[in-house]
Image (cartoon, rainbow, N blue to C red):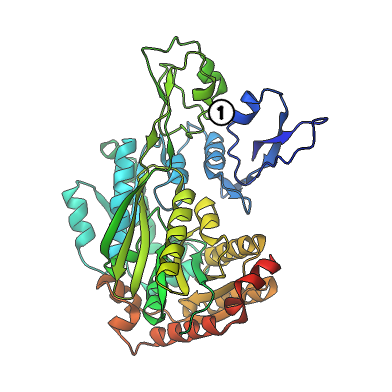
C-alpha cells in the first residue's frame, strides 16, 4: 500500500527545506501550488496488504508500517478488494475516529460488541452515536455476561438496539481465545448460536524532592488488556503526579476516577471545505485536485471523506469554497481523588486525534510545572497509529500491558517496535498471565530478545472487573487481592528501573 510523498526536484537550489514524511498526508497541495514546480512526488509505503484463503474463505489483511499515520487509505484499499456479490465481514478497529469511519462507512450492517461494565456502556454509547451519524442499522452482542449489571441491556432497550447474542463470562472461553483457537471448534454448543447470530445479522429488519519531570505512558497493542484499570491503580500509588488520559477516541479513565471538572475548552482541530453554490460555476477543478474523492457529482463535499487539507480551497478559480474551522471535541482540566487530570473527548467522526493527544499532553506538562509535580501518568490509546505516536513523543518510558493471547503477543511486538523506532525505553507486564502460561513465556522471551524489560505478571482476577463496576481501583475494591499485590510490585519495579530514572538530558542524548 503506497501513498505519494513530495520531494524537492533535481537541479533545484539546496535550501533548508525539509519534508517530514511521517506528517505528510499526501494531499498534493504543495505539489499543485509551488510556483517553481520544485516539488515532485514519489511513492512511499504505508503498509502491507496480504491476501489468502482459509477453508475456502477469502481473507484480506492490512498492516500499517511502524511510524506511519495514514490508516484510512489502507482500510479503504482493503475494502476495494472485496467482492460486492459476496458477504464481507470486516473486523473494525476500536474507537470512533477516522480508521473506524473508514471501516464502517457504507456498510450494510454494524454489529457492536460490548461488555456489561461502565467502560463497555460508555464506549457503546459513543459507537452508537457514530453509527447513527452514518445512518447504518446495527445490532448488539454482549460479551462476558454475568460480570456486571443490567445497564447495557437497559440502554439497548431504551435506544431500540436489538441484542442479538449474549456470551457468558467464562474462563474456559478466555483460555480458548488465548491459544488462538476458535470457540466454535472447542465448544461445539456455540456453533448453532453463532449461526443464529449470522442469520439475525442478515435479517433485513436490522438494516519527594523536586526532580526533572518524568512521564510514563501506559500502552497496549489492543483494547481490553486492562491498561486503564492498571493506570488508575498506579495513580492511587503515585505521589506528586498529574494524570493524562490520551485515549481521546474512547476515554475511560474518568469512569473510575470520577473527576470534578474545573475547566472545559473547545478543541478546534481542523477545517472543513464547503462549496458555496452561489459562487460555484461547476468547472470541476475541485474534483480534479481532490485526492480523497470527497467532492460529489452534485458539487457538494462529503464531510466524511474530506481530509480538511484545503487544496480545493486554494485552487478553486472562483474562490467558491469556504474553509471554516471546525470544533472537533472538548478537553478538560479536572480534579480527582488522586490528583489533577487532563483529559479530552474527540467528537464523533472527527479527525486530528493525534493533534488532540499532543494538546492534552502539553497541557498536562504545563499543569505539572505550574504545581511543582514531577510525574505525569499517561493512559495511552491502543494500537500503533497516529494517536499512539502523538502520545509517546519525548516520554521518559512506556509500559506495555499485554495479555497472554495470540493477538496479545502479536500486538505487543508491534508496540515494542514502535517504541524502538522512536528510541523510547519500553517495559512490559502481562495481565491475566495464568490464562495461558505458554503464551506468557513467549511474550517474555520476545520482550527479552527485543530489549524490553519485563516488570511482572498479574493474575487473572475478577476483582479488576468488580472494581471497575464500582468505579474503584483494585486497591479500593479489595486491598488484599493477589492481583493488587502484583500491581504494587510492578509499580515499585517501574520506579526503580534506571530507564525510568534517567535524567531527561541523558534520554535526549541517547536519542
Give me the residue at 47% from left, 58% from top: 362
In the visual, does 82 lie left or right of 136? Answer: right
In the visual, does 52 lie left or right of 122? Answer: right
Q: Tell me how many marks there are.
A: 1
Q: Residue 148: percent from the left, percent from the top?
A: 25, 69
Q: Residue 400: percent from the left, percent from the top?
A: 53, 69
Q: Relative to 143, is 40 above or below?
A: above
Residue 147 in sight here? no
Q: Relative to 375, is 209 above or below?
A: below
Q: Quadrant of the C terminus?
A: bottom right
Q: Quadrant of the N terminus?
A: top right
Q: Relative to 442, is 114 above or below?
A: above
Closest to the observer: 145 or 268? 268
Closest to the observer: 319 or 283? 319
Q: Residue 353: percent from the left, percent from the top?
A: 45, 49
Give me the residue at 29% from left, 40% from top: 132
Residue 101 in sight here? yes
Q: Residue furthest bottom?
A: 480
Q: Residue 14: percent from the left, percent from the top?
A: 79, 37
Give me the residue at 55% from left, 76% from top: 440
Q: Helix, strand or loop at disc 1?
A: loop
Query: Within 10 angstroms of label 1, few (less than 14), some, or many (20 or more) residues?
Result: some
Closest to the observer: 147 or 166? 147
Query: Which residue in the protein does label 1 denote?
Result: 291
Amino acid at each position: 500500500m503506497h501513498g505519494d510523498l513530495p520531494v524537492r526536484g533535481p537541479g533545484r537550489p539546496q535550501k533548508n527545506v525539509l519534508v517530514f514524511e511521517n506528517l505528510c498526508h499526501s494531499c498534493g497541495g504543495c505539489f499543485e501550488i509551488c510556483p517553481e514546480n520544485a516539488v515532485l512526488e514519489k511513492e512511499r509505503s504505508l503498509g502491507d496488504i496480504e491476501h489468502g484463503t482459509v477453508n475456502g474463505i477469502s481473507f484480506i489483511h492490512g498492516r500499517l508500517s511502524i511510524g506511519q499515520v495514514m490508516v484510512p487509505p489502507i482500510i479503504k484499499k482493503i475494502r476495494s478488494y472485496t467482492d460486492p456479490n459476496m458477504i464481507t465481514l470486516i473486523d473494525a478497529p476500536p474507537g470512533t475516529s477516522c480508521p473506524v469511519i473508514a471501516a464502517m462507512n457504507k456498510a450494510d450492517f454494524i454489529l457492536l460488541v460490548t461488555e456489561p461494565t461502565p467502560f463497555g456502556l460508555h464506549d457503546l454509547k459513543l459507537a452508537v452515536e457514530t453509527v447513527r451519524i452514518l445512518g447504518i442499522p446495527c445490532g448488539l452482542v454482549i460479551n462476558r455476561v454475568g460480570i456486571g449489571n443490567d445497564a447495557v441491556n437497559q440502554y439497548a432497550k431504551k435506544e431500540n438496539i436489538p441484542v442479538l447474542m449474549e456470551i457468558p463470562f467464562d474462563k474456559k472461553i478466555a483460555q480458548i481465545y488465548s491459544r488462538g483457537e476458535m470457540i466454535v471448534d472447542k465448544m461445539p454448543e456455540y456453533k448453532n448460536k453463532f449461526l443464529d447470530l449470522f442469520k439475525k445479522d442478515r435479517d433485513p429488519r436490522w438494516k519527594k524532592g523536586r526532580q526533572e519531570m518524568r512521564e510514563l505512558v501506559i500502552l497496549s497493542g489492543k483494547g481490553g488488556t486492562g491498561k486503564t484499570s492498571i493506570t488508575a491503580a498506579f495513580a492511587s500509588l503515585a505521589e506528586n503526579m498529574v494524570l493524562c488520559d490520551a485515549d481521546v477516541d474512547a476515554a475511560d479513565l474518568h469512569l473510575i476516577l470520577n473527576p470534578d471538572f474545573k475547566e472545559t475548552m473547545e478543541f478546534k482541530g481542523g477545517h472543513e471545505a464547503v462549496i458555496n453554490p452561489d459562487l460555484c460555476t461547476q468547472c470541476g477543478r475541485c474534483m480534479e485536485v481532490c485526492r480523497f474523492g470527497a467532492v460529489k457529482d452534485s458539487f457538494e463535499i462529503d464531510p466524511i471523506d474530506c481530509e480538511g487539507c484545503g487544496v480545493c480551497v486554494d485552487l478553486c478559480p472562483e474562490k467558491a469554497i469556504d474553509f471554516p474551522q471546525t470544533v472537533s471535541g472538548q478537553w478538560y482540566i479536572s480534579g480527582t481523588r488522586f490528583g489533577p487530570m487532563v483529559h479530552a473527548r474527540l467528537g464523533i467522526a472527527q479527525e486530528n486525534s493525534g493533534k488532540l493527544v499532543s494538546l492534552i499532553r502539553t497541557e498536562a506538562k504545563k499543569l505539572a510545572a505550574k504545581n511543582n509535580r514531577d510525574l505525569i501518568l499517561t493512559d495511552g490509546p491502543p494500537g500503533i497509529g497516529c494517536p499512539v505516536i502523538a502520545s509517546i513523543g519525548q516520554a521518559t518510558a512506556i509500559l506495555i500491558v499485554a495479555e497472554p493471547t495470540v493477538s496479545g503477543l502479536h500486538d505487543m511486538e508491534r508496540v515494542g517496535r514502535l517504541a524502538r523506532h522512536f528510541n523510547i525505553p519500553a517495559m512490559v507486564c502481562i495481565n491475566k498471565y495464568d490464562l495461558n502460561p505458554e503464551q506468557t513465556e513467549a511474550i517474555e522471551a520476545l520482550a527479552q530478545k527485543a530489549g524490553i524489560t519485563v516488570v511482572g505478571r498479574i493474575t487473572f482476577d475478577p476483582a479488576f472487573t468488580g472494581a471497575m463496576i464500582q468505579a474503584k481501583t483494585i486497591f479500593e475494591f479489595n486491598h488484599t487481592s493477589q492481583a493488587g499485590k502484583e500491581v504494587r510490585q510492578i509499580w515499585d519495579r517501574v520506579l526503580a528501573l534506571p530507564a525510568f530514572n534517567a535524567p531527561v538530558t541523558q534520554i535526549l542524548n541517547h536519542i
